[in-house]
Image: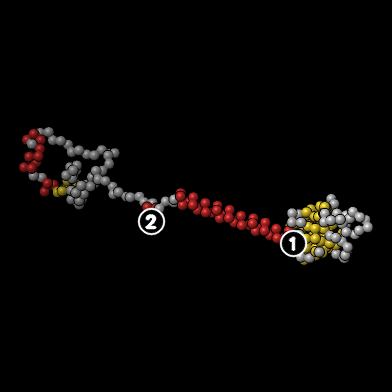
């Protein structure tokens, strides 16, 4: 038989460790020494033998389970946490890029619109009418015509005075013309020829 030196339980010779506390077992023959027993227990130990102490049913074994370290992917691979400062820099960079693109597109469209408007600027007269003094399209969207002559015997107006007869707005090669409470659409067929379409029909203007 074999005995556990910790809890004094006995086991078969085939067992090497205590089933309760995993302490290595010792043989009963080699562990019993009367002299050592008397020295350890004293003369009165045999009169009041102490029963072996057995662990309670709910008590955990005396040995500890191997420690299993838990790990996370971040600890395993050493990935640093995301920096809030870096995220703010990225957000500010994206916002700045969007603002820059918006300003660039605005400047482009304004420039394109201004360039298209300048194509209408100038004096335009009706095609086929040599005596037509024409109407002057200004850069600020006004349509100016010469004052009628003061002297009915004269075919030219007195001085260089003009009066506003309408306005216009430009969208690409087309202009919406407001004149005499009527809306007319003007389309540039070339830099020197414009087609006017309205309720009265279609006429053509040429640049003077």
Where residue 144 sits: x, y (%)?
81, 55
Query: What crowding class fits label 2: few (fewer than 14 Cα within 10 Å), some (14-19), or many (20 or more)?
Result: few
Q: Residue furthest right?
A: 153
Using the image, tell me which numbered label, if any, was put on residue 77. 2
Q: Identify the residue shown where x is 24% and y is 43%.
A: 62
Q: Identify the residue shown where x is 27% and y is 41%.
A: 60
Circle 1 residue: 119
Closer to viewer: mark 1 or mark 2? 1
Using the image, tell me which numbered label, if any, was put on residue 145. none
The answer to whether one can see residue 131 in this image is yes
Q: Which quadrant holds the C terminus? A: bottom right
Where residue 128 sits: x, y (%)?
87, 65
Where residue 99 sits: x, y (%)?
58, 53
Query: What crowding class fits label 1: few (fewer than 14 Cα within 10 Å), some (14-19), or many (20 or more)?
Result: some
The answer to whether one can see residue 169 in this image is no
Quarter assignment of residue 115: bottom right
Q: Identify the residue shown where x is 74% and y is 62%.
A: 119
Which of the two residues, 103 or 2, is positioned nearer the viewer here? 103
Element marked by disc 2: helix
């Amino acid at each position: 038989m074999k005995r556990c030196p910790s809890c004094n339980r006995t086991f078969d010779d085939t067992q090497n460790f205590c089933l309760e506390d995993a302490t290595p077992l010792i043989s009963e023959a080699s562990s019993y020494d009367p002299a050592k027993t008397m020295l350890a227990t004293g003369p009165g130990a045999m009169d009041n033998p102490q029963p072996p102490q057995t662990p309670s049913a709910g008590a955990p074994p005396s040995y500890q389970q191997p420690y299993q370290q838990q790990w996370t992917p971040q600890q395993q691979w050493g990935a640093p946490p995301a920096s809030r400062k870096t995220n703010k820099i990225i957000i500010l960079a994206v916002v700045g890029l969007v603002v820059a693109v918006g300003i660039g597109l605005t400047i482009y469209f304004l420039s394109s619109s201004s360039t298209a408007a300048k194509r209408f600027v100038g004096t335009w007269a009706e095609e086929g009418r040599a005596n037509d003094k024409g109407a002057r399209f200004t850069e600020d969207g006004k349509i100016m015509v010469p004052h009628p002559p003061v002297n009915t015997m004269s075919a030219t107006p007195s001085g260089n005075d003009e009066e506003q007869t309408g306005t216009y707005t430009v969208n690409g090669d087309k202009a919406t013309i407001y004149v005499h409470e009527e809306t007319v659409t003007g389309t540039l067929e070339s830099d020197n020829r414009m087609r006017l379409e309205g309720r009265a029909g279609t006429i053509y203007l040429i640049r003077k």
